[in-house]
């Protein structure tokens, strides 16, 4: 064997030599060995391998022996023994979460749309923060439109919605931090009122807004079905008559499943917001709208900038617009600039308010999952608890890095740096979740909570009674609280951004024009003559 190949094999052997102590505990096998030793006298009841109670007596009963950490390593250590029921564990707790991720609404920007999954898993805080900022911007544009379209007898709901939808499209197409109201007014600059009246213009605006709303995706019902199936899978895991029961009582693996529930609000909210079926559809609809507005002193057919309206939105040309979509607004969960346009009737403060809401789902997941790990016998900070703390630290650091990149690099490079950072967090994170459900933490060190109990660390070989009791009380209660809180946070987000969501969420009656035939949509002037 060549020397270089021999060195590689030495590295692999060294790695595998390190792995066995990390995944070597088989409780059933070790319990059988201890019971056999106690029965035939080969293992004395007062042996130092047994943990001692408060009275100083060894806990060496035949039914429920308790080992010290060193005793566990002595009697149970050696060899890699992954869980024999790894498949059911993954199917019950991990795979359903990945199915939820597959229901994430992604922007149609070719194959790059799948890269946003990396950003979601590597930086959930920034992903939800960006989505909430998008909704808040829409809400402020809705209020701006409602203020502008205020006749003497009150706010005209129909015209405000039409104008707000057009403003939302302006914001959609513009470069980050560019005021969509200024873009909106620029489209009307030079409007020739003699060639097109206010009533005619309102007809064109309504038709444009209707096309914009009609070209949006709407998969919220499908996503709700996926969430309901996830809830059913969780309930079935606790109620044996529904799911047939696990091959072993659920324990620490529930903590990993709970920690991933922060995905629920993001997936649901992304589908409520939706997106355009094609990035070209929004651009083409607005370009057609601009070409229908006659301007003073110009031949309507020969308007130069109508052939390419990209410069109005801050791009060099149409080609530049489509190339920059990945990092300039097409992805709602990736919004480097969190600027909120001011509205006198709606002011929730700075972008820090959406940030607080974005952190809530992750905090709920972390707290509830840590409760599960802490109260699993023996109580204390164990390997899964450390994994949760590492995840939280990584998510916070990831959000900070994303924010820093946005200020230190150009948009294109910020996008690539962010993706690289997210991949470095998301890929190892998913692998750790899979291997932890398959037995990564099945070791004496992890089972004894050695990290927090130190020399008082012990291992319950027969922990099934505790797990079964927790499975009837603690685990389902904590899981239910977590799911209820996540859904409540999602509903609060929808309620808070209800006005903004209505800009692009038109009912079937509104899109067909039936609702506006009753006189609700009045044709009055939109812009001052200029």
Image (cartoon, grey):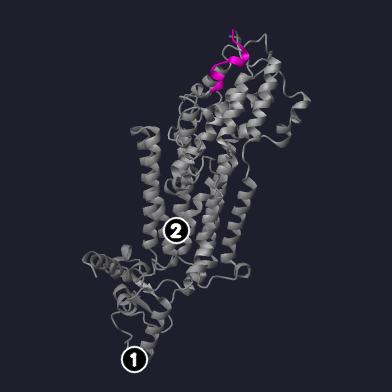
Q: Which mark is residue 41?
A: 1
Q: Nearer the viewer, residue 72 or 3?
A: 3
Q: Which residues are magenta?
A: 297-308
On the image, numbered disc 2 is attached to which residue?
A: 371
Look at the image and tell me in which quarter the N terminus lies: bottom left
Q: Is residue 426 above or below residue 160?
A: below
Q: Position of residue 206 (x, y in %)?
A: 68, 25
Question: Residue lying farthest left?
Answer: 3
Question: Residue at point 46% right, 55% down?
Answer: 259
- Report crowding for label 1: few under 14, some 14 to 19, many 20 or more residues within 10 A (C-alpha): few
Tell me if residue 321 comes above or below residue 442 in the rendering: above
Disc 2, SS: helix
Q: Is residue 305 magenta?
A: yes
Q: In the figure, 24 relative to 180: above or below?
A: below
Relative to 299, is 316 on the left or the right? Answer: left
Q: Position of residue 72 (x, y in %)?
A: 33, 76
Relative side of 289 to 69, left or right:
right
Q: Is any part of residue 328 visible from this angle? A: no
């Amino acid at each position: 064997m060549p020397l270089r190949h021999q060195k590689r094999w030495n590295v692999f052997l060294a790695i595998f030599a390190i792995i066995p102590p990390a995944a070597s505990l088989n409780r059933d096998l070790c319990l059988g060995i201890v019971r056999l030793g106690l029965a035939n006298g080969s293992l004395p009841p007062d042996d130092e391998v047994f943990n001692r109670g408060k009275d100083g007596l060894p806990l060496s009963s035949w039914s429920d022996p308790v080992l010290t950490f060193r005793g566990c390593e002595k009697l149970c250590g050696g060899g890699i023994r992954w869980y024999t029921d790894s498949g059911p564990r993954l199917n019950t707790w991990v795979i359903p979460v990945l199915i939820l991720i597959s229901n994430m609404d992604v922007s149609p920007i070719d194959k790059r749309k799948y890269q946003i999954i990396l950003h979601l898993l590597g930086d959930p805080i920034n992903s939800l923060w960006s989505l909430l900022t998008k909704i808040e911007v829409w809400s402020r544009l809705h209020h701006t439109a409602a203020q502008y379209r205020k006749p003497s007898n009150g706010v005209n709901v129909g015209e405000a919605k039409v104008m707000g939808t057009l403003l939302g499209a302006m914001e959609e197409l513009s470069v980050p931090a560019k005021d969509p109201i200024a873009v909106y007014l620029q489209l009307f600059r030079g409007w020739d009122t003699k060639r097109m009246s206010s009533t005619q213009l309102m007809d064109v605006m309504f038709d444009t807004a209707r096309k914009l709303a009609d070209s949006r995706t709407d998969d919220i019902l499908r996503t709700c079905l996926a969430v309901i199936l996830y809830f059913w899978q969780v309930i079935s895991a606790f109620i044996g008559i529904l799911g047939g029961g696990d091959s072993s009582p659920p324990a620490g693996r529930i903590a990993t499943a709970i920690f991933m529930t922060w995905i629920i609000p993001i997936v649901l909210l992304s589908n409520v917001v939706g997106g355009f079926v094609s990035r070209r559809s929004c651009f083409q609809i607005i370009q057609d709208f601009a070409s229908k507005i006659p301007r003073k002193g110009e031949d309507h057919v020969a308007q130069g900038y109508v052939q390419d309206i990209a410069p109005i939105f801050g791009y060099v040309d149409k080609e530049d617009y489509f190339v920059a979509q990945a990092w300039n607004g097409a992805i709602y969960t990736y919004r480097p600039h969190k600027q909120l346009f001011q509205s006198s009737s709606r002011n929730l403060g700075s972008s820090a308010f959406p940030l607080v809401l974005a952190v809530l789902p992750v905090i709920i997941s972390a707290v509830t999952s840590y409760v599960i790990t802490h109260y699993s016998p023996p109580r204390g900070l164990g390997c899964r608890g450390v994994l949760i703390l590492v995840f939280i630290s990584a998510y916070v650091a990831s959000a900070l890095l994303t924010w820093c990149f946005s200020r230190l690099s150009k948009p294109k490079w910020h996008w690539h740096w962010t993706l690289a950072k997210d991949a470095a967090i998301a890929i190892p994170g998913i692998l750790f979740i899979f291997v932890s459900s398959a037995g990564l933490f099945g070791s004496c060190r992890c089972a004894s909570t050695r990290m927090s109990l130190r020399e008082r660390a012990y291992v319950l070989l027969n922990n099934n009674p505790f797990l079964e009791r927790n499975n009837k009380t603690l685990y389902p209660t904590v899981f239910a609280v977590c799911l209820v809180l996540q859904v409540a946070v999602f509903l609060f987000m929808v309620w808070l951004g209800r006005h903004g969501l209505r800009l692009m969420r038109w009912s079937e009656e509104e899109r067909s024009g039936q609702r506006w035939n009753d006189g609700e949509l009045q044709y009055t002037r939109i812009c001052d003559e200029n």
